[in-house]
Amino acid sequence: MIEIKNLKKNFGEKKVLKGINLIVEKGDRIGLIGPSGCGKSTLLRCVNLLEKPTEGEIIFNNNDICKLSDLSNIRRKIGMVFQQFNLFEHLTVLDNITLAPIKLKIMDETTAKKEAIKLLKEIKLDSYANSYPKELSGGQKQRVAIVRTLIMNPDIILFDEPTSALDPEMIGEVTELISTLANNGMTMVIVSHELNFIKSFCNKVAFINDGKILEIGTSKEIFNNPKNEKLKSFLSKIKNK
Ligand SMILES: Nc1ncnc2c1ncn2[C@@H]1O[C@H](COP(=O)(O)OP(=O)(O)OP(=O)(O)O)[C@@H](O)[C@H]1O
Ligand SMILES: [Mg+2]
């Protein structure tokens, strides 16, 4: 579905991604782990072109999307969910969800609203349609943010630490929704420091260190039988926390 080839990203003199190669197949649930600052968020942001890669290719549906000038279609097909939800505080839940499909003329207003209510019903938040984000809990906000991505009917969703801004009691409702989407066949790449979730949920896990993937394998291989010394030390530090 997506093939990332020799992806590099520099910010000025600073080399952040140093040649990432990664294949995402349809239905994959890929976990990205690694120390703070290793480039996980930058990698996700490059994949949906929030950042322009310095070098390399991102092949999506047989096209190198780095070369495209119209990005709206790509952003629609490659959804992204952020740690801080990024909802518009001045818009209601319903308007947050329908804004993009109406603006991009994917749906007329009536259809978009109908679709948004249907999705909100599925996550039992339809009674909050006319509420503002500040009236929602963190877990509810994140589920609305996920629905906002879903209404665009994406082929893949990138999650950047979707639960790390949440109070512990709200993590479950968000991971449950993510699991439901995965069971329905959604392809996803997830950055998370919740290694237990990554371990049980992801079919493939990549360990990133200093802008490079040092090891990639099944969840079992990475967590139960790590080979790379830096991965071993990363895992043992987390276990001992
Ligand atoms: N817009 C930017 N301008 C300059 N440097 C940046 C920018 N975005 C990220 N960086 C740098 O790139 C490096 C990687 O950052 P990134 O946010 O991708 O790390 P991360 O692996 O997601 O870390 P964390 O686990 O803390 O979220 C960091 O050193 C960061 O300071
Ligand atoms: Mg990050």
Image: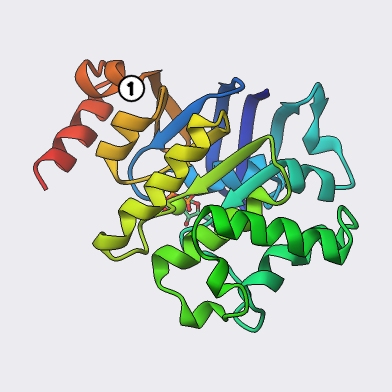
Question: Whole-percent x and y of residue 29?
Answer: 48, 29
Most extreme residue toward the left, as rendered?
240
- In depth, the one of 124 and 235 nearer the eye is 124
Count of residue discs: 1
Question: Whole-percent x and y of residue 170?
Answer: 32, 61
Q: What residue is rendered at 41% in x and 22% in y?
A: 203
Q: Can residue 157 be seen in this view?
A: yes
Q: What residue is rendered at 87% in x and 39% in y?
A: 68
The correct choice, above or below, for 132 with respect to 11 in the image is: below
- In depth, the one of 64 and 145 nearer the eye is 145
Left or right relative to 171: residue 154: right
Left or right relative to 93: residue 103: right
- Can you identify the residue that label 1 sits on? 219
Write down the quadrant of residue 147 in the picture. Answer: bottom right
Q: What element carries label 1?
A: helix
The correct choice, above or below, for 72 with respect to 128 in the image is: above
Left or right relative to 216: residue 227: left
Left or right relative to 131: residue 200: left
Near mark 1 (Cα within 10 A), the count class, few <14, some 14-19 or many ≥20, is: many
Write down the quadrant of residue 5 in the picture. Answer: top right
- In depth, the one of 106 and 159 nearer the eye is 106
Q: What residue is rendered at 37% in x and 64% in y?
A: 165
Ligand 1 contact, mark 1 (Cβ < 8 Å): no
Write down the quadrant of residue 90 in the picture. Answer: bottom right
What is the three-letter code of the residue carrying label 1?
A: Ser
Q: Is residue 71 visible?
A: no
Q: What residue is rendered at 79% in x and 60% in y?
A: 112
Work out which quarter of the rendered image holds the N terminus and state it. Answer: top right
The correct choice, above or below, for 229 with respect to 145 in the image is: above
Specify the color scheme: rainbow
The correct choice, above or below, for 96 with respect to 229 in the image is: below
Question: Whole-percent x and y of residue 159?
Answer: 51, 46
